[in-house]
Amino acid sequence: METTFTAVGYGLQRINPVFVESARVRMVAHPRLIQINTPGFTGDFSLLLSNNHSTGGTCFGDSGDPNFLGDTNIIAGVTSFGINGNCAGTGGVFRIDRQDVLEFIKNYLDL
């Protein structure tokens, strides 16, 4: 079973060496999980998600925006980094399901 996410944000819609497009509107994409908890690049603090033409993805300006688990309202992480300058291939998401992160966030919630 493939794990998908719903990424939302106001970042760039398109980028290449001579053309940058930013409509300044909220966009949505449905990237799929590429890597999690793998020694090396992502470790246990981030997810690597797809960024491609069929599922969409994140780009510059989306950092800090939520990535929901599938089509739920559960925030799995926040957009953190890209792998290349063209916003293609893969994008990194900082996981918020770790205990230390949840404790930090809880300090700012009105519960």
Image: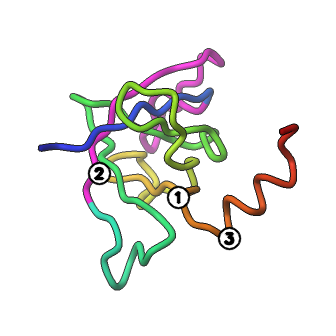
Residue 53 falls in image quadrant: top left
List the single residue furthest toward the bottom. Answer: 39
Which residue matches tag 3? 100
Q: Can you give x and y, in whole percent of width and height, for residue 3 in the image?
A: 25, 43
Quadrant containing the C terminus in the rendered view: top right
| C-alpha gap between disc 2 and disc 3 | 30 Å
Looking at the rendered structure, the kind of residue marked 1 is Arg
**Sequence-first disc among 1 and 2:** 2
Callout in the foreground (1, 2): 1
Is residue 26 in the magenta section? yes
Q: Which residue lies under the disc numbered 1? A: 95
Specify the label residue 106 is tagged with: none
Q: Dot 1: few (<14), some (14–19), or many (≥20) neighbours within 10 Å?
A: many
7 within the magenta span: no
Q: Residue at x 54, y 58 (%)?
A: 97
In x, y percent, where is residue 54? 21, 28
Please provide the residue range marked out in magenta. 11-34
Q: Secondary structure at mark 3?
A: helix
Q: Cα distance, mark 1 to mark 2?
A: 19 Å
Sequence-earlier tag: 1 or 3: 1
Expressed as whole percent of the image width and height from the top left, the position of residue 30 reads 34, 30
Earlier-in-chain disc, 2 versus 3? 2
Q: Find disc 2 in the rendering and name its residue.
A: 89
Secondary structure state at the residue bearing disc 2: strand
